[in-house]
Image (cartoon, grey):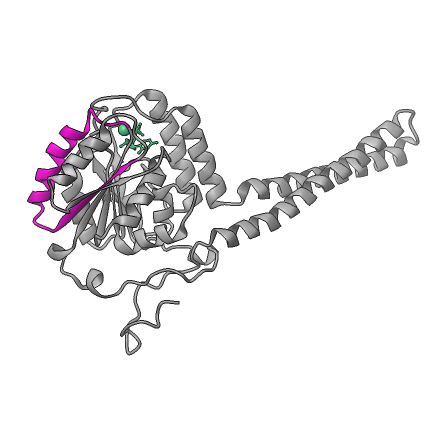
Amino acid sequence: MNQAGAWICAVPLAADALSPSGKITPIFGASAAASQSEQLVSIVIPVYNESANLPSLWSRLRPVLVAMGRPWEVVLIDDGSRDSSLEIMRSIAGAEEGRVRVIELARNFGQHSAILAGFRHVRGDIVVTLDADLQNPPEEIPRLLEAIDAGNDVVGGWREERHDESWRRYASQLHNRLTSLIVGVPMHDYGCMLRAYRRHIVDTVVECDEKAAFVPALANSFAKRVTEIRVGHSARAEGKSKYNLLRLATLSLNLITGFSLLPIQALSLTGLAIFVLDAAFALLLFAHRLIYGPQQEGAMWTLFAILFLFVGLIFLALGLIGEYVGRIYIEVRGRPTYIVRAVHGSEACGEGVRK
Ligand code: UDP
Ligand code: MG
């Protein structure tokens, strides 16, 4: 087994931990039944000020799609570009007779929101996301599809050799560890946007309708079989990265608060720790008094012990309130508790399964 194989496993979804909703589309009909070569492949590309890259992107992507021998469509999302990206995309769409669509967003909403907008408009059975700056080679798409055909729900690209600045690589390592831990699906590279998803995963992500979604993490949390393949990575062809340290930190913070109640629970635990330490301190003071009798500075220490008792209580109370707020948050977020993929047997014929 190669290194990736050992690291990645088809992790069963801890769906019970998710909030109830039941509004998710089970898989029926054409998409599940279509033979692999008939399945429509949708490519989703978020674009923000990439006019310098779009012509070469299209000249490399189109031949790859044509050579696949499957039906395909491309959904380009203009994420509020201020250069001529939109015009270039519209001219590409104009030349492709309905196979390329451009979704123009009203302003810049960020890469992941743009991808979500694309997800809402795709018609494919398999959806591939790709960056517009040619850092993800379009030539890798057939390998992603192979891995999907092998039965995976999600296939992630792993940029083993990254061509980014060193601070970005370190920040990404940290981000990957954190995401793997929080989502419970270990992967080397959550930041790589060269990824492929099966339709039902995309539907689930869309129906979650999250405002600060981190798409790869959300998708992995709904997938039964997830895998990662090594993909090439190039330096940005033209222009600069749209991410700085602050934007990356915001992404990580969204991820932590979007996937776990850990920060709130840390409050309760801190309260508990202060409480226990304070009880030990009070016992020590009491023993000291019994052994050595009353001391002049004893009153001051007793005051400290009482003070810390209240500090501990305040932390505990905050944590407790936080737990309730967290539960409200989980309910409001409305992620599905479970997803029915198919019903087998006599019930398996039509509506009625969708709850
Ligand atoms: N992008 C976007 N909206 C944004 C920032 C980025 O649609 O607000 C797009 C961008 O045009 C590119 C992809 O997301 O196609 C990745 O962006 P970038 O190359 O800046 O990120 P990096 O490769 O540095 O992670
Ligand atoms: Mg890039």
Image spot of residue 4 (x, y percent): 26, 41
Q: Front-most of 225 and 292?
A: 225
Q: Which residue appears at 64% of the width and 38% of the height?
A: 270
Q: Quadrant of the N terminus?
A: top left
Dividing the image into 4 quarters, which one contains the C terminus? bottom left
Magenta residue check for 62: yes
Q: Residue at x 39, y 27 (%)?
A: 171
Q: Quadrant of ligand 2?
A: top left
Question: Is 113 on the left or on the right of 52, as rendered?
Answer: right
x and y percentages locating residue 285 in the rendered image: 83, 34
The picture places residue 191, in percent across and down from the top left corner, at: 33, 35
Q: Tell me which segment is drawn in magenta.
A: 49-78
Q: How many marks?
A: 0
In the rendered structure, the answer to whether residue 65 lies left or right of residue 220 reads left
Nearest to the observer: residue 301 or residue 180 = 180
Left or right: residue 164 versus residue 277 is left
Q: Position of residue 347 (x, y in %)?
A: 31, 76
Seen from the viewer's position, the closer of residues 186 and 243 is 243
Residue 346 vertical placement versus 92 (above, below): below
